[in-house]
Image (cartoon, rainbow, N blue to C red):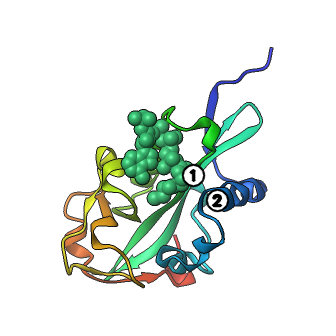
Amino acid sequence: MVDLSLVLSPQTPADLAAIEKLDERAFGPGRFARSAYRLREGVEPDHALSFVARVGTLLVGANRMTPICCGPSPALLLGPLTVDPAFRSGGIGEALVGKSLEAARAAGHKLVLLVGDMSYYGKMGFAPAPPDWLAFIGPVDPARLLYCELVEGALEQAKGKVRRAARADAF
Ligand SMILES: CC(C)(COP(=O)(O)OP(=O)(O)OC[C@H]1O[C@@H](n2cnc3c(N)ncnc32)[C@H](O)[C@@H]1OP(=O)(O)O)[C@@H](O)C(=O)NCCC(=O)NCCS
């Protein structure tokens, strides 16, 4: 019998083509112009913290975690988070985020940022960054710039410009 239960596993380079297809379908070509994409340009995601969801052999969801800098501190940018439309509303998105946060915490990371809807990410521990605390790399709706502390007080240490991680900063 074929096992069709959901399996989450760390992303590998072999998953990239399927992830690209999911992202293209969800966000279209305009995704490359988004401010958050500029933070990811030329920086490898941390594969151990970036998970894919499979049902059988089908890749049905993915989440990425990319090293960034927040003021003087290293941090992670969560996303894009994408779930195949046919598999939405089954908890896959939340499970992918939970897995990435758990792995990041275990690896000693302190702070995670994302650009997204508070109405979705609020229940996963994210909150809007205080006004004027973080200067994002490009235009972003301040209500959608969200953070999650993996260590209490991490945001306090991360005031300033949100920048692409230099290769030397990558974890
Ligand atoms: C957002 C997304 C990843 C959620 O995946 P999922 O596996 O369906 O997520 P979950 O099952 O954990 O949660 C689903 C619930 O969240 C809600 N939800 C989805 N996107 C939401 C949003 N932007 N704001 C508020 N609620 C949202 C759904 O309506 C659903 O509600 P329901 O359970 O009452 O039906 C998926 O809808 C997707 O791929 N969307 C397109 C890409 C995208 O917008 N990614 C997020 C970028 S920040």
Classify residue 16 as left or right of residue 158: right
- The image shows residue 91 at horizontal and vertical percentages of 48, 34
Spatial CA distance of label 2 from label 1 is: 6 Å
Question: Residue at left 49%, top 35%?
Answer: 89
Question: Residue at left 67%, top 37%?
Answer: 54
| Residue linked to disc 2 | 23
Name the one closer to the observer, 153 or 8: 8
Classify residue 121 as left or right of residue 42: left
Element under label 2? helix
Classify residue 61 as left or right of residue 100: right
- The image shows residue 28 at horizontal and vertical percentages of 64, 66
| Image quadrant where residue 158 sits | bottom left
The three-letter code of the residue at mark 1 reads: Thr
Q: Is residue 116 above or below residue 131?
A: above
Name the one closer to the observer, 47 or 30: 30
Kindly tell me whether mark 1's CB lies below 8 Å from ligand 1.
yes
Element under label 1? strand
Are the residues tagged 2 and 1 within 8 Å (C-beta)? Answer: yes
**How would you rate the neighbour count of disc 2 (Cα within 10 Å): few for under 14, some for 14-19, many for 20 or more?**
some
| Image quadrant where residue 107 sits | bottom left
Which of disc 1 and disc 2 is earlier in sequence?
A: 2
Classify residue 102 as left or right of residue 64: left
Question: Residue at left 73%, top 21%?
Answer: 3
Quarter occupied by the N terminus = top right
**How would you rate the neighbour count of disc 1 (Cα within 10 Å): few for under 14, some for 14-19, many for 20 or more?**
many
Q: Is residue 1 above or below residue 142?
A: above
The three-letter code of the residue at mark 2 reads: Asp
| Image quadrant where residue 98 sits | top left
Question: Residue at left 59%, top 80%?
Answer: 41
- The image shows residue 73 at horizontal and vertical percentages of 33, 77
Q: Which mark is residue 82?
A: 1
- The image shows residue 112 at horizontal and vertical percentages of 37, 62
